């Protein structure tokens, strides 16, 4: 018969909405080999299959847990939340200090209408995750050693619901004879700790760049469709392979697990209701694609016209051939060792399905570039070359079609660096310090480092605008560079490396040019103090070491004559 050798959970801390998948090691009787894949009743092995069951203990006292520190038991509840009809899970705190520290962000919940705080009908989140209310009801319960275990699942995996919060779960599996349907051998069982609610990220507002106050939290449902604008999100989601306890020892291990981060990131991303989404560090589970880029768009708002995949490694081979031709003393191996870094860019040409310029307007196209530039700060020449290569490709597209452009991504380049200067200013000064590192001569002469795209950094608008109502956002920008104080924040390092550039006018809030984009709104920036309550990013609240950037634009197309 099949022998159960080992059963364990990657994390013994179950979280609402995050699937639990036990690791089960089996040994086959025929050849004593080991297997780890599932053996369902429909596909038995050697006449045996594995039966799984999940239980929730019903005899223990349900424990309220802290909304800020979910591993801690709650000792107080905010009465203001009860009056404002805020979901009870968000009202608990483990201490008066916890409540006091969280008050600045907690009080925002009281300002939201009760309908907004409790809405969960027909939303995209519900379609994606399903309701996290009651679990399926099974007719059996077991009593062992004075404890009553209520059956909640009969599959290998189980996703805790809000009904499980504060309770312990038990997973049990046993080998079953496929003919008699009777268990054989000993069952294996493991217990979890008490189920905790998923931490809820602080809502972020969409701030109009004209300074008009918008007190409601981000809700773009119906907003873009009625106004003729569109939104674009850029987000480095932190690849699974990088999210290790060695790199982020300050973050709880359960909050670093991909099963948790996947659900938390999806909730955050879906909650932004963006029309175009540009993600970086997208992986398919192999070590060769951790720096992948993925671009998504709403089919009801855009249609796909063309796609360009920019693989910098292919460009590196062509560049190496040219370098060796001009300098036979260079080694091909030396060149490729420096240039081959597996970074990519993805360019999508889309056509807008909405029209805010009348029936005689010409076809509205949009070019969206999404990239992740190499991270090593010792390879400044390679980073600059990658950005320059992308921009020259975009120039070719611009020459073939008069088309607005968005350039999004993690450029791993701080404001004032050569790549940032090239993007924002269209050129790199000859005496720029980054140009001193160029062993292969790939960024010289500096005169070639230029482009003609009128790119503007979207988030620089907070610093440049003098409109009232933007004081808080201006405080979160560096007035010497006009960029955010940070888009990346770990315990030991904080900086800005993520950007959304667009083709506009440097005075775009005063002057509108044809065939460009007008910036309407920006997702508010986070303040460092609020992030430091969990030491840094990633955290149970935010599942990446970067913050998401989102901008709302309007196309300014010239009508057909």
Image (cartoon, rainbow, N blue to C red):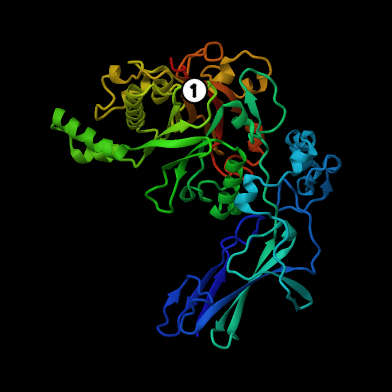
Locate residue 310 relative to residue 297 in the image: left or right: left
Classed neighbour count for the residue bearing mark 1: other residues with Cα under 10 Å, few (<14), some (14–19), many (≥20): many
Tell which residue pokes out farthest to the bottom in this image.
180
Q: Is mark 1 on a helix, strand or loop?
A: strand
**Left or right placement of residue 280 versus residue 70 in this view:** left
Task: Determine the residue positioned at 44% across, 28% down.
Answer: 366
Q: In this view, does 477 lie above or below 292?
A: above
Q: Is residue 444 above or below residue 113?
A: above
Residue 447: quarter of image: top left
How far across and down, in percent of the image, does residue 335 sit?
23, 36
Res 385 → quadrant: top left
Whole-percent x and y of residue 54?
Answer: 66, 69
**What residue is shown at x 19% (from left), y 31% (from top)?**
323
Residue 394 seen in the figure: yes
Q: Can residue 346 be seen in this view?
A: no
**Residue at left 33%, top 40%?**
341
Closer-to-camera residue (156/105): 156
User: How many marks on residues?
Assistant: 1
Q: Where is residue 194 in the image (x, y as percent from the top left)?
A: 71, 61
Q: Which of 476 and 364 is in front in this view?
A: 364
* Residue 271 occupies quadrant: top right
Check disc 1 and report the residue beneath it: 457
Q: In this view, does 496 lie to the left or right of 427?
A: right
Residue 159, position as x, y percentages in the image: 63, 60
**Which quadrant of the rendered structure holds the C terminus?**
top left
Q: Is residue 456 above or below residue 55?
A: above
């Amino acid at each position: 018969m099949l022998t159960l050798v080992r059963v364990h959970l990657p994390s013994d801390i179950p979280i609402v909405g995050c699937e639990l998948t036990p690791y089960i090691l089996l040994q086959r009787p025929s050849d004593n080999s080991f297997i780890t894949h599932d053996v369902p009743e429909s596909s038995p092995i050697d006449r045996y299959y594995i039966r799984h069951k999940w239980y929730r203990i019903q005899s223990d006292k349900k424990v309220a847990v802290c909304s800020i520190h979910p591993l801690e038991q709650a000792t107080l509840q905010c009465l203001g939340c009860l009056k404002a009809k805020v979901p009870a899970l968000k009202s608990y705190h483990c201490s008066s200090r916890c409540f006091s520290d969280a008050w600045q962000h907690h009080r925002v919940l009281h300002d939201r209408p009760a309908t907004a705080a409790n809405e969960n009908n027909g939303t995209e989140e519900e379609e994606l995750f399903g309701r996290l209310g009651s679990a399926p009801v099974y007719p059996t319960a077991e009593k062992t050693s004075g404890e009553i275990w209520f059956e909640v699942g009969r599959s290998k995996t189980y996703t805790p619901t809000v009904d499980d919060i504060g309770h312990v779960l038990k997973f049990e599996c046993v080998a079953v004879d496929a003919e008699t349907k009777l268990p054989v051998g000993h069952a294996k069982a493991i217990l979890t700790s008490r189920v905790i609610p998923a931490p809820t990220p602080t809502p972020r507002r969409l701030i109009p760049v004209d300074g008009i106050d918008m007190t409601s939290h981000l809700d773009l449902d119906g907003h873009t469709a009625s106004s003729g604008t569109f939104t674009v999100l850029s987000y480095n989601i932190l690849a699974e392979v990088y999210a290790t306890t060695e790199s982020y020892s300050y973050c709880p291990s359960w909050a670093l697990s991909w099963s948790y981060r996947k659900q938390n990131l999806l909730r955050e991303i879906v909650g932004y209701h963006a029309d175009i989404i540009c993600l970086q560090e997208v992986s398919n589970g192999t070590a060769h694609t951790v720096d992948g880029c993925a671009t998504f768009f709403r089919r009801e708002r855009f249609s796909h016209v063309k796609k360009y995949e920019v693989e910098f490694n292919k460009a590196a081979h062509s560049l190496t051939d040219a370098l060796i031709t001009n300098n036979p003393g260079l080694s091909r191996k030396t060149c490729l060792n420096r240039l081959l870094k597996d970074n990519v860019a993805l360019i999508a040409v889309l056509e807008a399905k909405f029209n805010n310029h009348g029936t005689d307007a010409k076809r509205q196209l949009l070019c969206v570039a999404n990239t992740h530039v190499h991270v090593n700060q010792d390879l400044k020449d390679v980073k600059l070359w990658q950005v320059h290569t992308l921009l020259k490709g975009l120039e070719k597209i611009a020459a073939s079609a008069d088309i607005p452009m968005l350039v999004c991504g993690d450029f791993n380049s701080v404001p004032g660096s050569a790549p940032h200067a090239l993007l924002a200013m269209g050129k790199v000064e000859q005496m720029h310090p980054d140009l001193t590192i160029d062993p292969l001569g790939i960024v010289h002469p500096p005169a070639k480092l230029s482009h003609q795209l009128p790119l503007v950094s979207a988030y620089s608008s907070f610093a440049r605008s003098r409109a009232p109502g933007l004081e808080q956002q201006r405080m979160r920008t560096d007035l010497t560079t006009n960029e955010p104080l940070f888009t990346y924040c770990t315990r030991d390092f904080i900086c800005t490396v993520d950007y959304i550039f667009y083709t506009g006018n440097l005075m775009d809030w005063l002057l509108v040019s044809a065939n460009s984009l007008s910036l309407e709104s920006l997702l508010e920036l986070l303040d460092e103090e609020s992030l430091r309550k969990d030491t840094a990013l990633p955290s149970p609240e935010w599942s990446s070491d970067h913050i998401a950037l989102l901008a709302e634009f309007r196309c300014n197309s010239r009508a057909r004559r």
